[in-house]
Structure formats: C-alpha cells, structure tokens
Amino acid sequence: MADSAVSFPALRRPVFRAYFFGAASAMMADSIEHVISYWIMYQKFASPALAGFAVISHWVPFLLFSIWSGGLADRHDPRRVIQLGMLLFMSVSVAWGLLFLADALEMWHAGVLLVVHGLAGVLWGPAAQVFIHDIVEEADLHSAIRLTATARWLGLLLGPAVGGVILMALGPAWGILFNALIYVPFALWLWKAPYARKVIAPERRVRALADVASTWRAVAHNRVITSMTLLAGGASFIVGNAYQAQMPEFAHDLGHGGGGLTYSMLFGADAAGALLGGLALESRGLLPPKPRSAFLLAGAWCLAIGGFAATRSYGLALALLFAAGFLELAFFAMAQTLVQLHAPAPVRGRVIGLFAMSALGLRAFSGVTVGLAGSLIGIHLSLALSAALLLALIIVMLWTLVPSR
C-alpha cells in the first residue's frame, strides 16, 4: 500500500513523532505567553494602540525576514536555527517575568519584547519546514506538513486553557517564568536529533530585498509555486486571521458577549475545526496535494467566513467557524506542501521563506481590510466583503493560473 493511503504516515517515523510533540509543546508555550502577557498589558496600560502593535509586531517580522531566515536554514544546520528561536522565546518569557516581579514594566519594555518575540517566530518557522525535509522522505512530506500545521493548531487550542490555569495557579510573574521551561525539552531534543542534510546549499549571503527578487525570479517559471504563493498571500492580505481580534464584538452581536464558556467556544471554534480536521484527514490519507484542490478548498473557506459574518445565529456561527478552521488547515497545508515539493533543493529555505513572507507576513495588513474598514462600515459587512473579494480573486487565479487538466 502506498504511504499516501496509510493513516498518519509521517507519525510512523520516530524522529518526526518526537518533532511533532515538541513543536506542539513549543506552540502551546508561545500561546501561553500571549495569554499572560496580553492580560498584564491590558491591566497595566489598557492601551488599544499597544494591543494593535502586538499584532503588527507578530507578523511584520515574517514579512521582512522570512527569506533571510530561510537562507540561514539553507546554509546552516536548521536545528541550530530553530534552537536560536527557542532561546529567544525563553528569553522573552523570562524578561516578562522579571519585569512583572519587579513591577517595573513600562510600555517601551512591552514594545521591545513583542518585537523580539516576533523575531523568534520568524527564526523558527522557515527553519522548521526545511528541517522536515531532512527527517522524512518525500512520500511522507504532505503528511508531515499537514501534521506540523495540526501541531500548531493543537498548541493554539491548548495554550489559552493551560495558560489560564497557570495564570490562576502561579500568578502572571511566576506563571510566565514557568512557561519558559516548557520550551526546554524541545530545545534539548534538537541538540542531538537525528538529522541528515540531503542537499548542501551553496554559501551565499542573503541580500535583503535583492534576495527577495532573486528568489522570486528563480521560481517564477514554476506555476505551482507562484500560484500557491499568490493564493496564500491573497488569503492572508485580504482576510487573514483579523476576525479573531474582532471576536468580542461578534460574540456580543450573537448574544454571547459576556464571556464564559460560550464566548470561549466561539473564540476557539476554528482551532478545534483545524485540529480535528487535520487528524481526520491524516487518519484516512485524504486530499492529496493538487493546485486545483487547494484553490477549491480556499474558496470554500471564503464561503464559510462570509457565512459567519452574515449569520445572527450563535449555533450556525459556531459551526461555520469550525468548518473554516478545517478548510484553512486543508488548503494552507496543501499549498505549503506543493511549494516545498517543487522548490529547487539548493534554495529550498529561501523559497519556504518567500512563501512564509506571503502567507504569514501579509497578515499584518488584514487588520486594514477587516478591522479598519469594520470601524467605518461595521465588522460584519467588512468581513463579508473581504471574503467575497478574496473569493473573486481565487476564481480569477484558478481560471488563469491552474491548467484545466
């Protein structure tokens, strides 16, 4: 039986299995830090501007430095690049904790720590995708990428729950210091993790914007890479995850704005859909990576997001967010798989960085299409129009970029 028909093929590899749980724990720790630090910033400053800066500082590093980070992973052992990211994550948690203990936190401290946290994420992301190529065979790559995305959603789902418990049990200062320890097992495992570099990239310095252009020229002839990069970038730029920041207002309009379980369920519905969807797809070996499938799944995601924006039924909104999470994981993991399968091996890290720059970095602008526009015309209409615009763009790209056969 072909590996693609076997359930969870990548998890059958011991090295990837260890990586999966390590990555999930690191993403959970990342989410826990957000839970605690955002709570402290709100208590101390109650600044909408700082909250907005937190979103910008998280995604702009991906826009500016993803190709540079991918170039590091091309030229050096990706395990060490990931470890550097883990070290920055731990350092930020420790710094938050010490500032909380000393009651010395100022707004500029928060700004600096948010930026460093964003840089840690961009070090981790492209290097982690390069590392996957060196621990699984190509036949298992789709499974490995989809499971890595599932691990991300698992961490995002567990983070708020575990973070809330830590916050109540230890308090913000000791809680975030404890959170730094969660990264340690994964960082230590990476030190001696089995690893075999399959392609040695030529030594070449990364030249910032010039390298963005050169990387794009290197893959511009490949319609799969260009179409998947444009698909992920368009989805991030126009819709992204900006609706999450508006969830309190959506919950209020749905009659569940007072907090509690119903609000938490609404906030975590897409993460639950992505997690369970990833597990279901892997258990059956469904949805092999194809460009047309990625576009169709992304179109269905637009319909789910648009339906959520339009409905006034709490139950239907919950179901549509759950479906949106499933569809987002499916099309995003498929697009990333296709990019990585078609990327030239010597510059794979840079191509992965280019994809990350488009798929993640452009999320910094979705706050304009959904958030800023929502302040003018209402968040329901702004999100619905953004989803409709993206759907129209997807139809055009599907018609022009993907062959009919």
Image (cartoon, grey):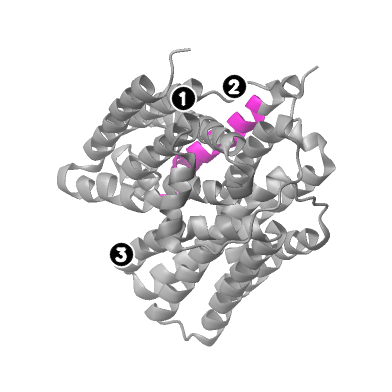
Q: Are marks 3 and 2 in contact (CB under 8 Å)?
A: no
Which of disc 2 and disc 3 is earlier in sequence? 3
Q: Is 43 above or below relative to 405?
A: below
Circle on res. 287: 2
Residue at which label 3 appears: 48
Task: Characterize the magenta stretch by its predominant secondary structure.
Answer: helix
Tally of marks: 3
Instruction: Identify the residue shown where x is 41% and y is 63%.
Output: 57
Mark 1 belongs to which amino acid?
Answer: Leu
Mark 3 belongs to which amino acid?
Answer: Pro
Measuring from the top left, give residue 402's x and y in whole percent.
42, 22
Q: Are marks 2 and 1 in contact (CB under 8 Å)?
A: yes
Instruction: Identify the residue shown where x is 69% and y is 45%.
Output: 132
Which type of secondary structure does the marked residue at label 1 adopt?
helix
Measuring from the top left, give residue 261's x and y in whole percent.
49, 44
Circle on res. 297: 1
Mark 2 belongs to which amino acid?
Answer: Leu
Q: Is 375 above or below relative to 117?
A: above
Q: Which of marks 3 and 2 is in front?
A: 2
Instruction: Write the start and end of the magenta stretch as one range.
Output: 259-281
Asked if residue 163 shows in the view, the reply is no
Q: Is 235 above or below relative to 110?
A: above
